Structures are given as structure tokens and as C-alpha cells.
Image (cartoon, helix red, strand yellow):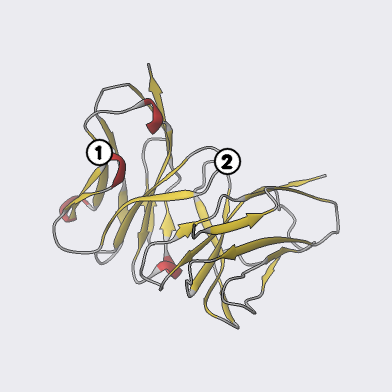
Amino acid sequence: DGGITQSPKYLFRKEGQNVTLSCEQNLNHDAMYWYRQDPGQGLRLIYYSQIVNDFQKGDIAEGYSVSREKKESFPLTVTSAQKNPTAFYLCASSPGVVQPQHFGDGTRLSIL
Amino acid sequence: AQSVTQPDIHITVSEGASLELRCNYSYGATPYLFWYVQSPGQGLQLLLKYFSGDTLVQGIKGFEAEFKRSQSSFNLRKPSVHWSDAAEYFCAVALYNNNDMRFGAGTRLTVKP
């Protein structure tokens, strides 16, 4: 079955540590997205990528970085500069920038 | 400023009762409109979307939504709620494409037996 796989499901970060969240899709979608979800706030866009080797900042990119070296992969690194990283992170993809997005099952990041 | 509002944080309905979840937006032009559903600890699933045309949109799982331009609303409805509909529902709005999509804060639905 085609879909989006996010790993790990749960992740813990120590102070000063960078952590990387994985997102892989086998839907052959061009566009991929990372969202952060906090209770009572809906989803906020961190980064998006419309094609391989290109990505753009979303509304809350500070403290995060991404890469898009392959069409199917769009990993997100939460750096030590992100002072409040505890949240639920969702990866999504879409065939193009207007078509509806498909979402992964998320990674919950917590601070040790 | 562009915004999406879901006025109801939490709604409780009895199984078999009808449901309406509200969504209002503040945009200068008619945007693309979406409703998504999220079960606990999972990602979002698209219920339905409105791009243009017929203002009454049918979706999956028996849901429908009506776009009302005069009220800047896109309310989600279901005639008879099932216990499995208990989840969080998000309205989303995009003016040009997914890159400028805004999500409402969500409405949590509880279904009483």
C-alpha cells in the first residue's frame, strides 16, 4: 500500500541535542511538508518542498532544518536552537501544490 | 489578516444525532477549503474539499459540507453520527496552494452512547 511513513513514533531529546525525524513516502508525490501540532493550535507549517533539492521555510522554520535529496524522503532536524520542541510533528505529501495532502501518523517529540 | 476559525473547541453529541461543525474564514477572495479528521495519535485524513462549483460537497464516511460565500463559512455536517466518528476535526483553508494553507484550531467530537 502507498503511504507516508514517519519514524520514530516517539522521540526524546536531551538539552543541546539535535534530533532528526524521518519521513518517507512511496506515493510518487512531488511536494512534501512538515507541520508542528500543539494542543489547541491546529497545525503550523515548518518547511515545504515542491521538488527535489529545493525547499522553502514555512511560518515557524526557526530552529529547524530539512533536506530533500530524494523525491521520497524529507527528513526534519530539530536543532538545539529550537527552545520549545515538545510537540507532535506531522509530515505530509501531495502530487502537486494544489491537490490535497496525505499525512503520516506523526512523531511525538519530548524533552528529557 | 487571513485566518480560519473553528468556534467550537469541543462538541458532544449522542450516537444517531445529527452533527454540524462550524468553520469560518477571513480571506479577501474565495479560498480552497478542506475538512480533515484526526484520530488520537494519528495523522490527518481528508474528509472532503471545495475548490469551485457546487457549494454542497459530499465526502467520505457520510460527511458533507456547504460553502456559503456570504457568510465566509464552510460547515461540516453529518445526518447521523456513529461512535466511530469521535475524533478531532480540522478545517483548513488555502488561498493559492498548500504552501499557504492555514488550519483551524480543531473541534473535538465526543459521541455519547
Residue type, label 2: Gly
Would you name the residue on which mark 2 appears?
B41
User: Which quadrant is the C terminus of chain A positioned in?
Assistant: top right
> Label 1 vs label 2: CA separation?
24 Å
Q: Is mark 2 on a helix, strand or loop?
A: loop
| Residue contact between numbered discs 1 and 2, judged by CB atoms under 8 Å | no
Residue B61 location, quadrant: top left
Residue found at x 31% / y 54%: B25
Looking at the image, the residue that sits furthest to the top is B113
Classify 10 Å Cα crowding around label 1: few (below 14), some (14-19), many (20 and above): some
**Where does residue B7 sit, x and y in percent of width and height?**
36, 39
Residue A7 location, quadrant: bottom right
Judged left or right of residue B81, residue A1 is right
**Where does residue A39 sit, x and y in percent of width and height?**
56, 41
Would you name the residue on which mark 1 appears?
B77
Judged left or right of residue A5, residue A109 is right
Residue found at x 51% / y 59%: A3
Judged left or right of residue B25, residue A28 is right
Whether discs 1 and 2 lie on one chain: the answer is yes
Q: What element carries label 1?
A: strand
Which chain is home to disc 2?
A: B
**Where does residue A27 sit, x and y in percent of width and height?**
48, 66
Above or below residue A87? Residue A46 is below
